[in-house]
Image: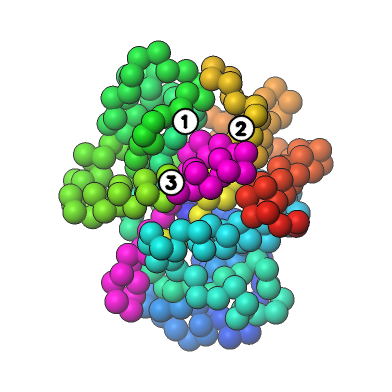
Amino acid sequence: MSSTTTAPLIEAPRLEGWDHVVSGKVRELYVPTGVDPSAATEVLVLATDRISAYDHSLQPGIPDKGRLLTGISLFWFEQLADIVPHHVLSATDVPASVTGRALRCRGLDMVALECIARGHLTGSGLADYRAGGSVGGHVLPAGLVEASRLEPAIFTPSTKAEAGEHDENITVAQARELLGEQLTEQLESLTLALFERARRIAAERGIILADTKFEFGRSRLDGTLALGDEVLTPDSSRFWSADAHTPGRTPPSLDKQFVRDWLTSPASGWSKGSQEAPPALPSEVVAQTRARYVEAYERLTGERF
């Protein structure tokens, strides 16, 4: 799970047979009743409708977001399963009250690294490039602009921050110092293989996968490295419509960048550098965000939501 908040916006539901152990920004984590969370070989991951940006949980939530993220993740886990094992055991053997939003998963000891792949230059990657001509230790050609395609895609890891702290972009060399050369090379290879597969599948559906982050962990049963958390959702990825892509301009997104853009606009009246909590999301921002998530779900999976 991603960094946790000190207090969830909504109390986690009580689920028979499961103990609630962690509230993340958008997910709740449970273990079987009476089991030590640090040793649990099975966990229940519940996706809520909460949405976060700039290390803040926002109010209100986005209706149906938990179901949308769960459905998109399941689609991608199936598409990528031949590259690396994933943590999902069942999407149906879960408490009835959370069907569609919960996944029964293998317990993993998570690797302390956000594994980011970038196929286009934008966001913090663009900021790093403008500052020094490189991203994550990769020296890039001169003259690149917002939304320039990176070919091949690059691996740009970041640290996983503790609650209330910020993730920090690091170089691949720094990742090797943290995790060792063998594990870092394995994570880089898997990340780029997963990204290239996903980039091709998304392109077939008229969507550009600009960047995404993966999280990996080791199975508590046999130590196998597995893909965990969510995967290739509008929360963890940048999705752009291919027909709106023009280098030099930020394309309209099918992800939560829409929320970030509103938060940093004059309309919100909020500064991300302040110590104040962000304002409540207006109803029109909530509705338009939901519409983008639904469009991403339907275009990627080919199913009506």
Question: How far across and how far down the image is residue 72, in percent?
Answer: 61, 56
Q: Amino acid at mark 2?
A: Ala
Q: Is residue 175 above or below residue 226?
A: above
Q: Is residue 141 above or below residue 277?
A: above
Q: Earlier in the sequence, mark 2 or mark 1?
A: 1
Q: Check disc 1: other Cα within 10 Å, few if <14, some if 14-19, many if 20+.
A: many
Residue 92 position within the rendered picture, expressed as x and y whole percent measured from the top left: 62, 77
Question: In the picture, residue 90 is in which quadrant?
Answer: bottom right
Q: Which mark is residue 36?
A: none
* Disc 1 target residue: 120
Mark 3 or 1, nearer chain start: 1
Look at the image and say whether residue 35 sits in the magenta stretch: no
Extent of the magenta region: 197-226
**Residue 242 circle label:** 2
Picture quadrant of residue 274: top right
Front-lying residue, 294 or 221:
294
Q: Residue 195 got which mark?
A: 3
Q: Amino acid at mark 3?
A: Phe
Q: Secondary structure at mark 3?
A: helix
Q: Quadrant of the C terminus?
A: bottom right
Could you tell me how far apart the alpha carbons at marks 3 and 2 are, in whole angstroms?
A: 17 Å
Q: Judge the density around disc 2: few (<14), some (14-19), many (≥20) Cα neighbours within 10 Å.
A: some
Residue drawn 41% across the image and 29% down it: 150
Position of 10 compared to 135: left or right? Answer: right
Looking at the image, is mark 3 or mark 2 earlier in the sequence? 3
Discs 2/1, front: 2
Which residue is nearer to you in this view: 159 or 288? 288
